[in-house]
Amino acid sequence: MDFHCHLDLYPDAKNLYAETVRRRLFVWLVTTSPKAYEATSRVLPQTELVRISPGIHPEVIGQKASELPLLLEQIDRCELVGEVGLDGSPRYSALFSLQQNVFDATVRRCTEVGGRVLSIHSRAAAREVLEVLEGSPGFGTAVLHWFTDSPTQLARAVKLGCWFSVGPAMFSSANGRKLAKAMPRDRVVAESDGPFAKVDGVPVPPWEALDAAAGLAKAWSISVESARAQLVSNGEQLIKKMSKLRLDH
Ligand code: MN
């Protein structure tokens, strides 16, 4: 199971896709723009197990904000939305208000259509992400991907009902380990965030997302097997939420 993967952006995407199908893995393939969603959906068939979602990544907002109307239209017909969110790090902060306009419109549309499951980026902007979510009740289910903010914002996200997708790379930082420890155990799922997330310099493939169990086992003081079983059972619950939204395509 891999709840946040940029499968289309690995150099050998087609082989990787074939391998995930062969292994019968569940993969949530998040795209970074509405046009990328359309292109990827044409090349890599969407199946029960490989789910592809439209988004606008905050890091490319300058080039992609004009595709917002297309994203809003795609949200009408897609149960899953992502990657969306905000990035407050210095490199992207010049366009922060544009990011906010786009993310706000995206979340509002999710509310208007009765709720969606969203994979959300919140680097250096968790407070602002949560403000948008709090301002649009009924948006659905938020899965905060690779959450790296403070324990205060984590507590706020938990209160709001957020889920968290966690990958093996998260445990290489002390803050990542501390946050993982404080996450509600029944709302954590596995992610690779490949090919961007790397372990020992190598992009994490989707079938290694569940290796996050090793880090979670330490954080939660349980066995690796128990952590893995917990991730699988949580993943099944989240897939059920997605299935309840099943739209007629
Ligand atoms: Mn990502």
Image: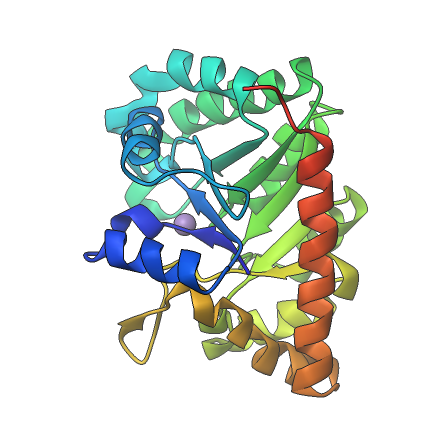
The residue at the far left in this view is: 11
Q: Is residue 187 left or right of residue 192?
A: right
Location of the C terminus (image quadrant): top right
Q: Residue at x 39, y 14 (%)?
A: 70
Location of the N terminus (image quadrant): bottom right
Image location of residue 15, percent across then percent down: 26, 58
The answer to whether residue 151 is above or below residue 76 is below
Image location of residue 101, percent across then percent down: 47, 20
Q: Residue at x 60, y 19 (%)?
A: 248
The answer to whether residue 88 is above or below residue 188 is above
In front: 42, or 87?
42
Q: How many marks?
A: 0
Q: Residue 68: which quarter of the image? A: top left
**Camera sees residue 152:** no
**Camera sees residue 70:** yes
In front: 59, or 29?
29
In front: 43, or 113?
43
